[in-house]
Image (cartoon, grey):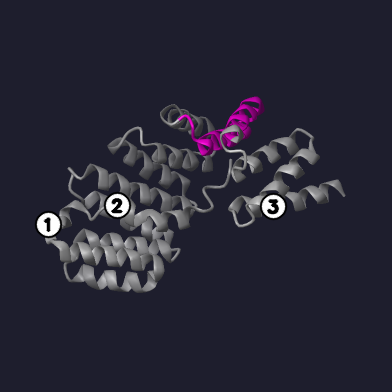
């Protein structure tokens, strides 16, 4: 299957401030605490080491869930994904039972951290707990499908992507991920069908072109594979898919020569 969201760390840090409001248990602390939380979370993106140090001091001074969350996100930014995941799971367990949405989002972040740490089973467990709190969350289903694929649970990944596609049928990325899972199951006709639909929705989708190139290579069509991978490099040179395309092209040339 496609590598687990190679851009996930950047996406996570860019969206985390908007994705999670000030933890409910701390909202009674007033606007000063909310301002400190927002400032800390912004700093976690710009200077995670400084944010972590300040969050630890703030936590010792009674910063509560807000400080703990900022410290965990700072660890994520520092690439200390296992520590971040462990802290996020502890934080979710300590949050008020009624704070269903925030707890689910913290667990989702833990799952993403476990994924980046290469711990697919732990990621699946965290994301499953999040889905128990907020069923039918498309992003959680997508992330859990990726976690399941990392442990070769491809049919279970397809199940998650089927539901995600039912909920949001016009998402090219869901179709591309499902095509990748089908390829891993050697269901190439189903994979090709999903890729056709995905690239009709988004003709220049780099991951879709990458995956179609892989299918074409497997089908004995090196020229088609080369065309897809070259298109990625030309149109999306800074994308994670472009690096994979470069590697695939290099391997293709070695095989041909």
Badge 1 vs badge 2, beta-carbon distance below 8 Å: no
- Secondary structure type for disc 3: helix
Q: Which label number is shown at residue 72?
A: none
Badge 3 vs badge 2, beta-carbon distance below 8 Å: no
Q: Which label number is shown at residue 28?
A: 1
The residue that disc 3 covers is 234
Q: Give the image location of residue 88, x and y in percent.
A: 32, 55
Q: Main secondary structure of the magenta part?
A: helix
Separation of residues labelled 3 and 2 (CA atoms): 36 Å
Q: Earlier in the sequence, mark 3 or mark 2?
A: 2
Separation of residues labelled 1 and 2 (CA atoms): 16 Å
The residue that disc 2 covers is 20
The residue lying at 59 percent from left, 42 percent from top is 205
Q: Which residues are magenta?
A: 169-198
- Secondary structure type for disc 2: loop
- Secondary structure type for disc 1: helix
């Amino acid at each position: 299957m496609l590598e687990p969201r190679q851009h996930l760390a950047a996406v996570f840090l860019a969206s985390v401030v908007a994705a999670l409001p000030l933890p409910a248990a701390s909202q009674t602390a007033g606007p000063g605490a909310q301002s400190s939380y927002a400032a800390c979370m912004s700093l976690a993106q710009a200077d995670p080491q400084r944010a972590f140090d300040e969050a630890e001091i703030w936590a010792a001074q009674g910063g509560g869930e807000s400080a703990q969350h900022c410290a965990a996100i700072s660890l994520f930014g520092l690439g200390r994904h296992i520590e971040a995941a462990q802290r996020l799971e502890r934080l979710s367990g300590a949050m008020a039972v009624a704070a269903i949405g925030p707890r689910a989002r913290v667990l989702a972040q833990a799952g993403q951290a476990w994924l980046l740490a290469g711990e697919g089973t732990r990621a699946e467990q965290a994301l499953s707990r999040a889905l128990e709190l907020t069923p039918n969350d498309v992003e959680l289903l997508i992330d859990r499908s990726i976690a399941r694929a990392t442990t070769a649970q491809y049919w279970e990944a397809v199940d998650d992507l089927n539901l995600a596609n039912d909920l949001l049928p016009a998402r090219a990325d869901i179709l591309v991920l499902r095509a990748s899972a089908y390829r891993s199951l050697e269901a190439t006709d189903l994979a090709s069908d999903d890729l056709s639909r995905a690239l009709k929705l988004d003709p220049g989708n780099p991951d879709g072109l990458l995956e179609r190139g892989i299918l074409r290579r497997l089908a004995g069509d090196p020229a088609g594979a080369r065309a897809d991978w070259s298109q990625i490099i030309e149109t999306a040179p800074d994308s994670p898919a472009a690096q994979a395309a470069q590697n695939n092209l290099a391997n293709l040339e070695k095989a041909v020569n």
